[in-house]
Amino acid sequence: MIFSRENIKNLNISAIIRDSLDEGNLDSFLFIVPTNRWARTFKKELIENSPNRSSEKINIETLTTITQKLLQFYDKYNLISSATGYVFLKETIEEAEIEYFESYKNEVPDGTLEELNNVIGEYKKEGIDSKRLLENAEELSGYEKSKVHGIAKIIDIYTKKCFAARSLEIGDIYFIIANLPQEKFSELFKLNFPNVGLIYINGFNEYSSLELKIINKLSLIYGIKIFINLDYNTGNEKLHKHLTTAYESFIAYDYNRIGDINDHTNSSFYLKDYLSQNFLRSVKKKEERYPIIKLEGEDRYKEIELIARELKLLIKQGIKPHKIAIVFNLIKEYSPLVREIFSIYEIPFNLSDRYSLDTIPVISSIINFLEIEEEDYYYKSFFRGISSKFLSISDTDFTELLKISSELRIISGYKNWVDSIKTQLSKGEDPELKNALKGIIYVHNTLKPFVEPQSIETFLENLKNLIQNTGLFYKMLQSETDNAEKNVKALSVFYESIYEVLMQMKTYDGESKLYSLSEYLNILRTICKWSRFNVKERSDYGIQITTLEEIRGLDFDYIFIGGMCDGDLPTKQNSDIFLYGDVKKQIEMQFSKDAYKFYQTLSMYKKGIYLSTPSAGKNSNFEESYLIKALDRILDITSKSAADYSDSIFSKKEYLIEAGKLGNEKYDIFYGKNDIIDDKRKEHLYNEIKIDQIRIDKRNENEYNGVIGGTDLLTPAFEKVYSITQLETYAKCPYKYFVERILHVETIEDPDENITSLEIGSLLHTILYNFYLEILKKSIVLKNCSAEVFNYVLNLIMKIGNDALDEYKFDRVKSFYEIEQIFGIEGDREKSILYQFINYERENENEFAPSYFELEFGMNGSLPIEINDVLIKGKIDRIDIKENKIGIIDYKKSIAQVVKKDIIEGLSLQLIIYISAAIDILKNKLDNEMLPEFVSYYSLKYSRKDFGLRKFPSSRDKNDLEYFIEISKTHIKNYVESIDKGIFNLTKLEGQKKPCNNCAFSNMCRIAEYLPN
Ligand code: SF4
């Protein structure tokens, strides 16, 4: 249906254009189309059809570009970029202090911000300003009323900001242009398009009220003929509902309805007509000439895989990829899937979804680097900032730096980094440390220009220098070709957006204002989140991936419409919290709009249309789109699923999966066996698969599951000296022992400024050792001692403790609680571990006398103990003696208990082996045969109920210690024999005993594959 003020019966626009092309006067036309892509494609088409292939005089605009052009001759305003818009909107929300946002403590979530931004855009396009909102709010009450007041306030402040910065929303531009006096409007138009005598408006699937007003103004320009092609069918209201306002407006503006006698000779014209009449309704007999194929994927990933397979079939038939398009209503979720799957299937494609700046590593590397200074050299930010492959930051080995931060316990602070490393260097030459210091200083010098608050000009200059000095350009261009192009575009959009936003801020805040690095970074982060960009598409290359919105006006032989599930298409009805009144009604037309876009795409049918559906999402199942059901009522739809492609292979990945099923030769390799994989690689592959199967086969022992066998490469196991901890590690996981003790793989812990429990334990050991040496020297017995002796020893232990504390050099502020627990909470000595210790020793029923402390064997020059041919080293915290009986005590800062089952299973060896060692050592020292009486952990926990000895065996146990000693000796012999035989399998322990939680080697050992459950 064509609307015009002309009094003619029919219009054949194709014929008119053809004639104009021949006569070379196409500059008398102005085409207005809905999208830039349509404008570009149409222009290309016209140039190709013009006799001299000239583009000079072709006027093709969108309503956005034409109104901007008119405005340029009227007043100097620019269209606001999305990045600037979001920066202003965030500032507005902070300034407006409206009740609705009070619940967001720190920041309005991105989703809400985006929703608000869209709604403001909708209001503006409809010409609704804050004043009109407030007027309408008079009819409301309570929460609704205050909500509308809040939105009005935001629109008001936001609009003022935009005008002050001379950057306007498209709705504001429409408003200015639509409200110009007709005379001025006509004058501006003539200045821009002096030769135009005919305007043809085509392809719009909706019009806002301001757009209708602008079109009417165009129609009233003297000497201009205007034709508006409105795809509207009065006989199918459900499909065209959202265009009813436009239709009625054109009638109200007194336009004539004239016939469209375009050159619609192709069959799709019939289909368009048929759909326009019947879609969303029922027919008696389906139209069979336009069969449609539906691809049913189990989920979105598999849906795209099905599309990829179908595409390969089409390409094999000789269809050129650029003659095929895949469209989505909501492309965001599908873009990454298409990128991944089409790369796997080696399908060339042109994806028109835009990239967000914050997903581009080269951009993140700049922001992360600046964040080093912002976060005061916090070790995590520091490593994140310097580890980018795009920055050349001296030749420092930053893994080494990570190790240094852990060893020197450096958490943050530039000065702290430098001082700590310098102090360490003062103890001796260390080239790695020296190099690390050089690297840190280099980073600091590079960031120095950003430290002080600075003007916008200075910041932009510093940023430019930073990008140049860190070699980012050079590194960026070295990346793969596709990425290099993307990176260069991202960097230029990044810089342009920053420049634009900061210049707007300068206009708004004044030139002299200085901002801190944090303020600049907040702006940069917002810009990155909301700036999107496209990489230039290659002409006539690859499958076009785009949206239903963008495909309008383009030309393809085959179209796939993906994501055909309710929620995606049609989109979920939005209960938009910010919407109100007429705009809400407009948005509620969503179903009609979506159905209409779908219908428009179907109408492009040339050689084939495919629809594809996912059945399930991450958390729920999808309902097939209602639009498919509606289409099924009027056209033939045939379904295909994964099973329909199962006799062929479409990609190398599929080949590898099938090859993984070993010996499976029944498949006809889709594009030639040898093209996919050569025989040599195939042999390797089969070999790798076999090895993996052997590795996870628990029935056999071999080098792939840890049994490497005896080898000359390792020191003979019985020649080594073992600590009990090492043997306990082997007992729990032989592989872990292998990695830690034979390969010597080290893990780097996060630095910790606070005192660790290991250090507390070490401090307490030192205090108790020195204390007992002192009182033994003075022949003081603690058991049942007098109050006077008690006071003396309390003073003594406190003094010894404080001396030891001085040696340890802990940060007393950060570790004050742990220190108070040892010496007295809030200065009260009775509330201390040391007090509890001497009190416990005084009152304890134990008849044994503390006799030996920190007794070492196999360490610091002392000889190891030999047990069952195994050489053992260790240190016994304390030995208590009564006559010829001995007990072993191990101090612990935690609660620990000797568990009989663990001893029997060989998982707990320490105390039992230690008492055996003690008997050997004392036999030589005392020339006396000592008998084992007990072993015990001594809990030094602050809590009174947990404090003290837990002896083993308990009096109820029928076995004596000698029995357990024999068991443990056998275990250690077995372990060392296994080490000698090269047995280093993954742990076989299960349930609570499985030692894998928090094990740093879990990725390396691949236990998850070995024990999938
Ligand atoms: S994760 Fe488990 S199996 Fe793997 S090395 Fe650690 S303890 Fe052993």
Image (cartoon, grey):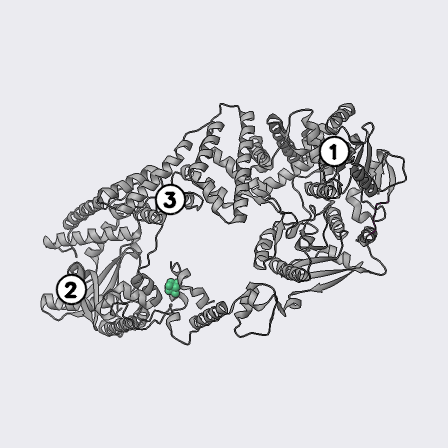
Q: Can you tell which mark lies on residue 863?
A: 2
Residue 319 falls in image quadrant = bottom right
Question: Is tag 2's residue or tag 3's residue first in the polypeptide sequence?
Answer: 3
Return the residue found at the far bottom.
699
Query: Residue placed at 90% from the left, 35% from the top?
Result: 7
- Where residue 475 sits, quadrant-wise, is top left
Name the amino acid, label 1.
Leu
The mark nearer the N terminus, 2 or 1, is 1
User: Disc 1 marks which residue?
Assistant: 210
Residue position for label 3: 379
**Quick check: 486 above or below 854?**
above
Q: Secondary structure at mark 3?
A: helix
**Amino acid, disc 3:** Tyr
Q: Nearer the viewer, residue 496 or 615?
A: 496
Q: Indicate the secondary structure of the residue bearing disc 2.
A: loop
Q: Which residues are magenta?
A: 261-265
Could you tell me if residue 679 is visible in this image? yes
